[in-house]
Image: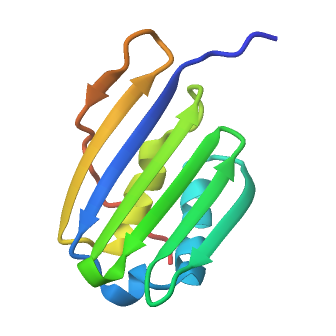
Amino acid sequence: MEYSTFGRHVAVDAWGVDFDRLNSAEWLQAQMVEAAEVCGATVLSVQAKQFEPQGATVLVLLSESHLSIHTYPERGFAALDCYTCGETVDPQLAIDFMVSVLKPEKVYAKKLVRGIGEVLVETPEMKQAALVK
């Protein structure tokens, strides 16, 4: 079987996020797993680290690649990214979900289209995900 090398990688800098949202690795892990499920990805494993005195990193390893977040609660900042290989899983859906739950004041985003030759850099349209909670 031959696999496509095509992939999309969405990276977001989120500013003005509530301290408590960014300072709970446990809460972030639950949100990240749900974001992976929303975009149709297959979760293989999850690593989460709560830092002292504050901050968290969560990495969701996907069959299709990864979803990650690194937080700086004292600055209201989160670095978030999702890379997926193939055509069937859209990383933008996971990013939109996370932006919806983080509720940042400002978002800066880029999408890289990879695996087709030269890397294409695009500015994605950010949408608030419809939360079913």
Picture residue at 60% right of the left edge, 59% below the top: 59
Residue displayed at 37% across by 12% down: 118
Q: Position of residue 104 (x, y in %)?
A: 25, 71
In the visual, does 122 lie left or right of 68? left
Residue found farthest to the left: 106
- Relative placement, left or right, of 46 versus 73 is right
The front one of 104 and 73 is 73
* Quadrant where the N terminus is found in the figure: top right
Q: Is residue 6 above or below residue 30?
A: above
Q: Is residue 130 visible?
A: no
User: Image check: 79 left or right of 5?
Assistant: left
113 and 35: which is toward the camera: 113
Furthest residue in direction front, as rendered: 52
> How was the colour assigned to the protein in this rendering?
rainbow
Residue in view at x 37 percent, y 19 percent: 119
Residue 60 image offset from top left, x and y in percent: 63, 57
- Horizontal and vertical percent for residue 86? 59, 26
Work out whether 35 lies above or below 3.
Answer: below
Residue 41 placement (x, y as % from top left): 64, 46
Which of the 4 image quadrants contains residue 102? bottom left
Q: Nearer the viewer, residue 11 or 54?
A: 54
